[in-house]
Image: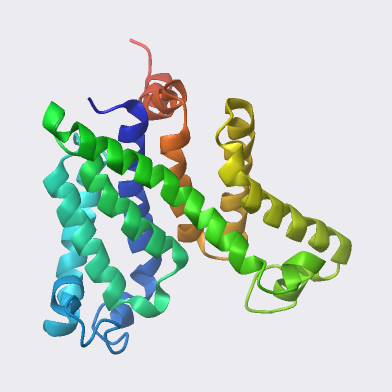
Amino acid sequence: MITDRTLLFHRLAHAWVLLALALQLPDADVLWTNEAGRSVLTGTWAAGLLDPYHHLPAGGVYLGNGLLAMLAVGGLFARPSWWRSAILWWLFVAWMNAAWPTSTGGHQLMANLLFWNIGLALPDRSRFLLARTTAFHIVRFQLLLAYLATTLHKLQGHAWLDGSALSQVASDPAWSLGWLAGLPVLARVFTWATLAFQALFPLAVWWPFTRSLFLAGGVVFHVSTGMLLGIPEMGAAFLVAYALWLPEGTARTILEAPRAAVRRLSPTS
């Protein structure tokens, strides 16, 4: 059966797609008209399959993204379906490759999560149990691998180890952290806290108490960095993957929250 946390993951993934589409709308006249540049898959076997818009008339991205948005909205309410999830994944990857200059690590992570969401949406029959279980664990480990890869990348240089990484970012006018440039001690604390959080997360999630602490801290971390750095889709992608690490009761509460809010706001008869 579709568990509450699987259903929550499914719906959050669809909500993320709508968020990512909305964030690109202001630049759609450039990014969605095949002007983003040469296909990154040119010359590979996957070019025609995973990057079809570079082989179609200009503006084809608009039609594909219209269908992508419709599927994403439907996924917020409909029961998970493997074939709809497969079409959603294909349209998303096609769009991501068409607008590749604006693709972030969040887009790459979601491409993987949406692919394995196909397995999670398989029918509730015994012959699909292994595929559904495999997809469930791969999505969970994908999150841990993302944190591990990020940590290893940060350890390649010296800025994160000596605590100067965020001070360097804060001094760059391209980001919205100018206020932190004049607070070097605080910047150093935030730098080391970020590194510690990402390094310890793959270990902390295996114990209920530390898992709750790190999931709660992760929500604060990804929401704040997403908004302050102007990349909300990046942080939101990680939060989508959090759903499969939640207890069933917590996932059920989140799923029922919108309906409960509507009941509270509705006038009593």
Quadrant position of the N terminus in the picture: top left
User: Residue placed at 44% from the left, 61% from the top?
Assistant: 106
Q: Nearer the viewer, residue 19 or 94?
A: 94
Query: Is residue 71 rendered to the left or right of residue 158?
Result: left
Reply above or below: 23 against 97: above
Percent position of residue 198, x then y: 62, 52
Nearest the viewer among 196 and 34 is 196
Relative image position of residue 70 (x, y in whole percent): 19, 53
Q: From the viewer's perspective, is residue 1 above or below residue 49?
A: above
Q: Nearer the viewer, residue 247 or 220?
A: 247
Q: Outermost residue toward the top? A: 269
Residue 77 visible (yes or no)? no
Image quadrant where residue 61 sits: bottom left
| Residue shown at the point (20%, 44%) measured from the top left | 74
Q: Is residue 74 left or right of residue 221?
A: left
Res 89 → quadrant: bottom left
- Seen from the viewer's position, the closer of residues 169 and 196 is 196
| Residue 171 at x, y percent in the picture | 75, 77
Instruction: Indicate how the structure is coloured in the image.
Output: rainbow
State which quarter of the image contains the C terminus.
top left
Q: At which x and y percent is residue 41?
A: 25, 81
Q: How many marks?
A: 0
Residue at horizontal 15 percent and vertical 44 percent from the top = 82
In the picture, measured across the screen, residue 41 lies left or right of residue 151, that is left
Q: Is residue 58 left or right of residue 105?
A: left
Q: Is residue 249 visible?
A: yes
**259 w.r.t. 102: above or below:** above
